[in-house]
Image (spheres, rainbow, N blue to C red):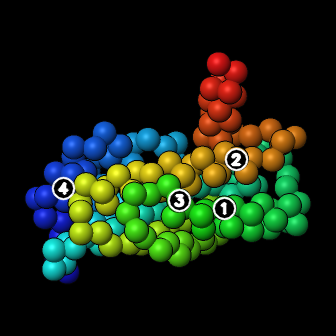
Amino acid sequence: MTESSGRVARAFRDHDGFDGGDGRFEATTTAFDAAVTAHESDGRVDYEVSVRVPSLSAAVDGDVAQVVEDGWLETFELRVADADGVVRGDHDFEPTVDRTAGEVTVEFAYTDINERRGVEDAAAVVNYVEGTYVQGVIPGYDYVDPVAGLVDRARGTGEQ
């Protein structure tokens, strides 16, 4: 496997949703930490998309019962598994969702022969994870940033 070729780096550079280079590109369209690595092999590009979001208990000001946290994570995991519907490529996603101290990491891996479509799909997946997260916000909690900002933005968009 080789590092990103010029065509892959160019596709990321031409997309307004990413910054970076040398095979790692940071998403700029989300409040969460999201990055894509891309490596070319035999004319195909292997993409790995990683999005880190706060766990429910890390996103709220106050306590969250463990049963609520576990149920929220289970629902979030089920929802992100449906990301296939937001991409243009024919990818059969099997995302991994891992919870560690205060954080949930969602990872997708796929291969595409078309570098521009692959980059568009990476952006779509990042935005899908953010949107799925916001949809899963449970009313009644006081959220802290970045989640509070996302909720405010969603409310503002809904009121327009």
Which of pointers 2 and 3 lies earlier in the amino acid sequence?
3
Q: Nearer the viewer, residue 84 or 29?
A: 84
Q: How far apart, in angstroms, are the residues tagged by discs 2 and 4?
A: 32 Å
Q: Nearer the viewer, residue 13 or 69?
A: 13
Residue for point 44% across, 57% down: 87
Label 2 SS? helix
Q: How far apart, in angstroms, are the residues tagged by discs 2 and 1?
A: 10 Å
Which of pointers 2 and 1 lies earlier in the amino acid sequence?
1
Which of pointers 1 and 3 lies earlier in the amino acid sequence?
1
* 21 relative to 121 in the view: left or right: left
- Graded by Cα atoms within 10 Å as few (under 14), some (14 to 19) or many (20 or more), the crowding at tag 4 reads many
Residue for point 39% across, 57% down: 88
Residue under circle 4? 9
Which of the 4 quarters of the picture holds residue 83? Answer: bottom right
Q: Which mark is residue 79?
A: 1
Residue contact at pointers 2 and 1, CB within 8 angstroms: yes
Q: How far apart, in angstroms, are the residues tagged by discs 1 and 3?
A: 11 Å
Residue under circle 3? 85
Direction left: furthest residue: 6
Q: How far apart, in angstroms, are the residues tagged by discs 2 and 3?
A: 17 Å
Residue under circle 2? 135
| Rendered view: 159 above or below 1 | above
Q: Amino acid at mark 2?
A: Gln
Q: Quadrant of the C terminus?
A: top right
Q: How far apart, in angstroms, are the residues tagged by discs 4 and 1?
A: 30 Å
